[in-house]
Amino acid sequence: MSWNRSVRLPATISLTLALALGALAAPALVSAKPAPLQFGVGTGFDTSKDTGAMPQMVSPGSTVAFEVWARNTGGSNISKLFLTARTAAAFDSVTVTNTGKTAGSCSPGTGGGVALRCSWKPVKPGASVRVRLILTAPASGPSLPVNFEWSSSGYITGGNNSHGDLFTTNDAAALNGDIDSFAGRWVKVGDENLIVQTNPNLSNANPQSTKITAPKDGIPVTAGEDGDLSDCQEFFEGCFGQASVLNVNSGEAFPGGFTVEVVYKGTFPYAEFVHFFDDGTFEELEECGETPQAPCFQLDVDWYANTTTVTFYLTENGKTFGH
């Protein structure tokens, strides 16, 4: 089967700055100003990013990372800061980074849809907190939504109360259960299994398999097949099979290289291969020498099994084509 890369699942980011009002029966009370909190998703302090999911599409039952951050942009302390993550996914692990002598930590949530609870005090002017939450996606469904709730008054259940501010961020990762043409997950820190692989059982319906061995742990990796050969056909004749679509840490370059093994149903003893980068440029790959040095490929034809196995040694992600 062919995997046609989907448009990234839209992640709605709701920025709600809610003022806590005094009781109507006490008109002499003055409502407090909202905490001077800037917050967002993803790496860097970039408020324009609409998702912190890594990868943005994963296989059901696999791990996925979400990264969120907040910082005090005001001139005085935020005396307390809380974060709650609400999702149907299961808690796996969390990493917290605090700056500016901020004291705080995170722990698994209470269950019942609450996957994470964090607290800090105080958050001084200019200080920031960053949370990377690893979740295990459900075994089925089209997406994995997560609702992050920042508050200066405590753990709030789904909305504001009368004593503080609530700042919400909605994020999501797409789930793709087509094992023949897609595999994706967050390769966890300390994970000895660095392999991300589409269905290796070839058939007429599944004529190609792609396996990536991640160059390190703690990164998002996806592998897939796409029947669109137009990139290859624009420059080369005889393009065959499917494009193997590779995402290794969102395009990070790895000078030491990493391996990708593509198995085709059929024998292609004289095939050549090309690697397209994310920006549309490409490199024509040479066969590896005795000691493989990226970028290059090794070809192995199994006439009895009617398969061709190509091992690519690459330094960054993109698409590979045979021609």
Image (cartoon, grey):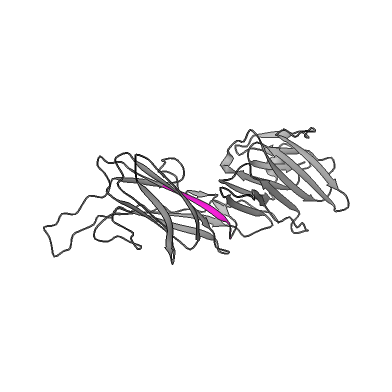
Q: Residue at x 63, y 49 (%)?
A: 192
Q: Quadrant of the C terminus?
A: top right
Which residue corresponds to the image point at 73% horizontal and 46% vertical from the top-left?
261
The location of residue 74, given as percent across then percent down, is: 27, 41
Residue 232: quadrant of the picture: top right
176 or 81: nearer the eye?
81
Residue range in magenta is 61-68
**201 with respect to 9 (left or right):** right
Q: Residue at x 85, y 52 (%)?
A: 306
- The answer to whether 293 appears left or right of 305 in the picture is left
| Front-most of residues 160 and 127 | 127
Where does the image place residue 69, in percent across and percent down from the top left? 40, 46
Task: Count numbered badges in the picture.
Answer: 0
Q: Which image quarter: residue 36? A: top left
Q: Is residue 288 magenta?
A: no
**Residue that lies at the very extreme toward the bottom in this rendered image:** 112
> For residue 178, which quarter of the picture?
bottom right
Does 62 appear in magenta?
A: yes
Q: Nearer the viewer, residue 111 or 171?
A: 111
Whether residue 115 appears in this view of the structure is no
In this image, 293 relative to 83: left or right? right
Residue 104 image offset from top left, x and y in percent: 36, 49
Q: Kindly report the secondary structure that dominates the magenta region of the rendered protein.
A: strand
**Outermost right residue:** 304
| Residue 271 visible here | yes
State which quarter of the image contains the N terminus. Answer: bottom right
Relative placement, left or right, of 133 versus 202 is left
Residue 33 image offset from top left, x and y in percent: 22, 49
Kindly give the residue lying farthest to the left in the view shown. 28
Q: Which residue occupies the foreground of this view, 36 or 203?
A: 36
